[in-house]
Amino acid sequence: MAKYMLIMRSTDEGQAAYEEMDFAKVIEDMGRYNESMMNAGVLAAGEGLSDASEGAVVDFSSDTPVVTDGPYGETKELFNGFWIVDVASKEEAIEWAKRAPLSGAGTKLEVRRVNGPEDFPQDNEWMQKEEGWREQQAQRAQ
Amino acid sequence: MARAAGAARPVSDVVPDGEGRTGDGAASRRVVEAVWRIESSRIVGALARYTNDFALAEDVASEALAEALVAWPRDGVPRDPTAWLLATGRRRAIDAFRRRSGRDERYAALARDLGEGGVVTGGPGSAPGPADDLLWDPDRIDDDRLALLFVACHPVLSKEARVALTLRVVGGLSSEEIARAFLVPVPTVQARITRAKKTLAAARVPFEVPAAEDRAERLGSVLNVLYLIFSEGSTATAGDDWMRPDLAYEAVRLARVLTRLAPEPETFGLLALLELTAARFPARTSPDGEPVLLERQDRRRWDRSAIRRGRDALAQAVAVGRGLGPYGLQAAIAEQHDVARSVPETDWERIVVLYEALGRVAPSPVVELNRAVAVSMAAGPAAGLDLVDDLVAREVLSGSYLLPSVRGELLARLGRNDEARGELELAARLCGNARERGVLEAKAAAL
């Protein structure tokens, strides 16, 4: 079993087309899709992001970080949200991605494996600190 | 009947694989497996409802899968793989009915019914027609999947058959994968499935969700099968591997599916137990594959999100307000371990109370033995040993390595090393798992 992140990406063109869509229909289609993943026992997490114009970009190209409001001027694609699925293979993650209720030019889902502890050296001091932090977070959530 | 699957399929139906060409065998085989994992229960469920014949549905679904394994590497993956599998399975069902219709008018009528809507005119690779939509009645899919689980776990079947059939039709595992997981030859798994289908047919088990009066008992069988699958994955009873995590995670996935289909308190209790137990897997094995006992586990490696999911599921079981069942109580015990910072900081008094409750709803010598261990942690080894000696006197659990293993442990804590060594050596001789045996031998040698 491995976790994969399905990352929603779209160009300005895809974004414009999305904004034209019937919002109630989008909610319904997404709800149905999420439910199908819950029913299959594979959905681990998922979030959608608010409009990029409400956000900010911190750019590290120069010596000091430069902050810009809204989407960065030269951005070709926007990151709009994600799902994390718990599946047996990359192919299974891709099959789920293909079922997403998305369509149109400039709309994409990127499929990426989420690293687990096995991807890092466990004797590293910072990895151990991170595990400790995860533990505290979980206890706080209790 | 021509079997030229896909040969006449329009090119537009074929999607090139990642390398921009069709026919990469290994890659498209993995796609077939992925689609099957996601859709097997819906495909077999829909076919079983239409044919009202579970065995036939499993046969034709398997044939469709076998055909996909040949056709997709050769022709490319169809644009709608699920519809392809379903159309192929249904076509095979119609073929089967026609073969039998010479003998039986009932099959002839079924073949006519199924043939309506123009399905029989296309090849297996033809685009889904309106009749395929009929097969996917969205209001029935969940009922079909639930019925499938109930039939696969039917009490007329042996436990081994229930496990194999559930993994095959609901989990979407191949016979090869099941054989690998249980360390048995592939033909053994195939024979178990074939025999199970014959048994179901002979007992005339209908393809349906059981009526209300039978439902609790039948659900108990489904929960038990998922628990057995998980147990085999989390502590392999034979062989050199200490665990087979993929099998255990498959059981977790099926338990999540079941909470959606049958949201009963004990379903949530089972899911909670499996999540809270699987959460400790990352710390249960040392880098060289040796088992690491609870007191030595690096608790920072426990899977915090699994603990959270397990606790959420347990809260749902508790929220019903009817008290916890056996799985819920075991989950509550697992929860006490999962939230403790160390063995000494564990709330052992609470665990003793939970074991007492478990002993009332599901009495068993293993529960009593576990209670003895909890008592020894809460009130000292002497108190625990009294309970264990009582089990010995009653001659329960004889032949199991568990009793001498716990007895040896408690004697060692009391400083009675010679007796402890004898018990641990006896436990090692009785233990079937090579890794676990090694741990017992090492403990005996260290005294």
Image: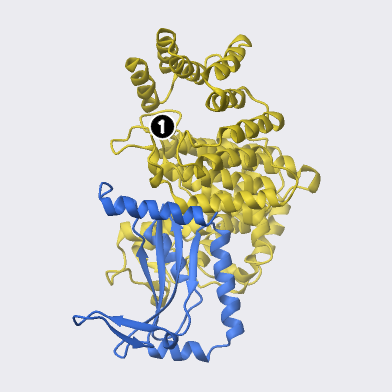
Chain colours: A blue, B yellow
Q: Nearer the viewer, residue B56 or B18?
A: B18
Q: Is residue B130 left or right of residue B243?
A: right
Q: Is residue B414 above or below residue B252?
A: above
Per the image, the residue denoted by label 1 is B293
Rendered image quadrant of residue A75: bottom left
Toward which corner of the image does residue B334 lie, by quadrant? top right
Badge 1 density bin: few <14, some 14–19, many ≥20, Cα 10 Å: few
Q: Is residue B113 visible?
A: yes
Q: Position of residue B79 (x, y in %)?
A: 44, 72
User: In the rendering, at what x and y percent does residue B48 appear?
Assistant: 64, 54
Q: Is residue B171 visible?
A: no
Q: Is residue B58 above or below residue B138?
A: above
Q: Residue B433 or A65: which is nearer the viewer?
A: A65
Image quarter of the C terminus of chain B: top left
Instruction: Specify whether B360 is left or right of B246.
Output: right
Q: How many numbered marks, from 0 up?
A: 1
Give the x, y percent position of residue B212.
79, 48
Q: Is residue B148 above or below residue B340?
A: below
- On the image, the x and y values in percent for residue B206 come to 72, 47
